[in-house]
Image (cartoon, rainbow, N blue to C red):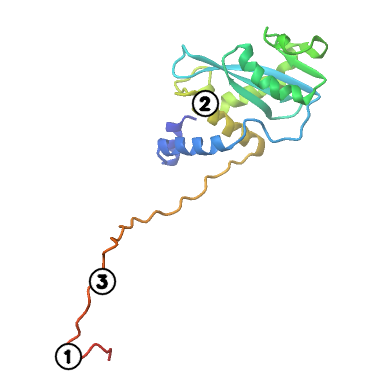
């Protein structure tokens, strides 16, 4: 669903929803907090766009073979410089195998002895990418929804990856009520009260 669709369903203004997504998305890590050390890591790219369909951008993902969830991801172009950011994370896992679809960038980072190209073996990571497209309207192949900025795309993905892992979402902290108080001048004094002499000021 897009933000305006959510507004129609919930009655909450789409700008409020956008601000909430930014607030929560920016507080979450790009890398899933997990103790998983994949023996087999699968890598793939998902194409989308920002601003217009002429401005293509790619989401690179890494998953653990046979287990659900995206372990790491980056957003950028389809160059080696973008994949290098993901590889800095993935190589630390020291997996036995790295499986890809054969895109030319991968073998420039992965040793031949650890590298496997097999499109039929990519169902796990492609399934995770399909889940992202299913839940996030801006990633649909044919859609009128799109991200106006790379930052908004990233925070949306970050929030969705978190939700698909934990099936819950963190809520923003409640706002502290703000009271409109007028500053009191330093020379301000309460007026003195003169009591009538005939009856005094003592309460009855």
Q: Could you tell me residue 85's position as x and y percent?
A: 64, 20
Q: Earlier in the sequence, mark 1 or mark 3?
A: 3
- Residue 15, picture quadrant: top left
Label 3 packing within 10 angstroms: few (<14), some (14-19), many (20+): few
- Is 180 situated left or right of 191 in this image? right
- Is 153 situated left or right of 73 in this image? left
Q: Could you tell me residue 77's position as x and y percent?
A: 56, 14
Q: Looking at the image, which residue is at 30% across and 61% down? A: 184
Residue under pointer 1 = 197
Q: Is residue 146 above or below residue 106?
A: below
Query: Looking at this view, is 87 or 39 the one in front?
Result: 87
The quadrant of the image that shows the C terminus is bottom left
As measured in the structure, the alpha-carbon distance from the residue carrying label 1 to the one carrying label 3 is: 21 Å
Q: Residue 8 carries which label?
A: none
Q: Which mark is residue 153?
A: 2
- Is 81 situated left or right of 202 in this image? right
Mark 2 vs mark 3: give the one in front: 3
Label 3 sits on a secondary structure element that is: loop
Label 2 sits on a secondary structure element that is: helix
Q: Which of marks 2 and 3 is nearer the N terminus?
A: 2
Q: In this view, does 58 lie above or below 156?
A: above
Q: Earlier in the sequence, mark 1 or mark 2?
A: 2
Residue under pointer 3 = 190
Q: Looking at the image, which residue is at 46% across and 50% down? A: 175
Task: Answer whether labels 1 and 3 touch (C-beta < 8 Å).
Answer: no
Q: Hey, which residue is sitting farthest top in the picture?
A: 104
Q: Looking at the image, which residue is at 73% across and 9% down? A: 107
Mark 1 vs mark 2: give the one in front: 1
- Is 6 situated left or right of 115 in this image? left
Q: Looking at the image, which residue is at 69% across and 20% down? A: 87
């Amino acid at each position: 669903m897009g933000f305006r669709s959510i507004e129609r369903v919930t009655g909450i203004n789409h700008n409020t929803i956008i601000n909430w997504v930014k607030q929560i998305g920016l507080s979450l890590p790009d890398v899933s907090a997990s103790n998983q050390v994949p023996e087999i890591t699968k890598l793939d790219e998902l194409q989308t766009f920002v601003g217009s369909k002429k401005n293509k951008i790619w989401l690179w993902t890494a998953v653990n073979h046979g287990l659900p969830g995206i372990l790491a991801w980056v957003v950028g172009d389809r160059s080696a410089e973008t994949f290098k950011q993901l590889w800095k994370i993935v190589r630390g896992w020291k997996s036995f195998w790295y499986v890809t679809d054969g895109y030319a960038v991968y073998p420039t980072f992965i040793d031949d002895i650890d590298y496997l190209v097999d499109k039929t073996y990519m169902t796990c990571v492609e399934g995770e990418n399909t889940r992202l497209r299913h839940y996030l309207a801006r990633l649909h192949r044919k859609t009128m929804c799109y991200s106006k900025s790379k930052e908004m795309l990233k925070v949306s993905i970050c929030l969705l990856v978190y939700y698909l892992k934990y099936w819950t979402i963190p809520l923003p902290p409640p706002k502290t009520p703000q009271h409109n108080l007028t500053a009191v001048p330093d020379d301000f004094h309460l007026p003195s009260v003169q009591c009538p002499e005939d009856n005094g000021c003592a309460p009855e």
